[in-house]
Amino acid sequence: MSPATMDLQDGRLTDEVVRSTMTNCSRGEAHRMRVPGWVLERDPGHEVVGWRDPKAPERGWLLVPCGEAVVGLALRATPGKGVRATAMCDLCRTTRSPGEVSLFVAARAGEAGRKHNTIGTYACSDLACADHVRVLRATPTLKPDPGLSVSQRQEALRERAAAFAAKVLATRD
């Protein structure tokens, strides 16, 4: 499946629009996805939006701007409570306290995904990378990429998330 363009209804993001962007899961999985209200208030055309499903905590969802399109990715967190040491998120490059970074895997799109071929990345356990890059000063549990402005961190997050999405969408390695 290719990236979907976001057709906003009345200029607003809807559950149906979010579901239509999902590229690496079945329609049934996309239909069962819980879209929090705050996601509908974000602008996935310009920022990476991620969340965990509170009713299925191993499930995560990521909306990634890729040019004029948005790629929706279904993710699955590996079992456990995250990395047991201080770790850095591969997407936002924020250093996090033990347990706040998890390994997420995404099924490859298309036939490869149906054969259980996956791509993995270490990401913030809450998938709130877009919020973490906005932090102005380091905290004891959250240390953003030093030496970069918020806008530079936001752009770098979009680029790394788009590269991850491209790997998920690639028909071969």
Image: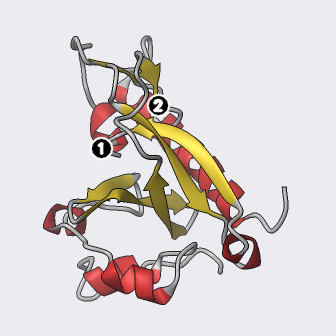
Give the label on residue 51, or none. Answer: none
Residue in the image at 76% along x and 64% along y: 170
Other-residue count near label 2 (Cα within 10 Å), few / some / many at <14 / 14–19 / ≥20: many
In this view, the residue in front, 64 or 90, is 90
Quarter of the image for residue 4 reads bottom right
Q: Locate residue 45, reporting x and y percent.
A: 42, 63
Is residue 108 among what the camera can see?
yes
Give the label on residue 126, or none. Answer: 1
Give the mark nearer the N terminus: 1 vs 2.
2
In this view, the residue in front, 159 or 51, is 51
Residue in the image at 39% along x and 34% along y: 82
Q: Secondary structure at mark 1?
A: loop
Left or right: 18 with respect to 113? left
Q: Locate residue 133, reporting x and y percent.
A: 34, 32
Please tell me whether residue 156 is drawn above or below residue 144 in the rendered image. Answer: below
Q: Secondary structure at mark 2?
A: loop
Can you identify the residue that label 2 sits on? Answer: 89
Three-letter code for the amino acid on which mark 1 is drawn: Asp
Residue in the image at 23% along x and 78% along y: 12
Give the quadrant of the C terminus: bottom right
Q: CA distance from mark 1 to mark 2?
A: 11 Å
Please tell me whether residue 116 is drawn above or below residue 165 in the rendered image. Answer: below
Three-letter code for the amino acid on which mark 2 is drawn: Cys
Color encoding of the figure = secondary structure
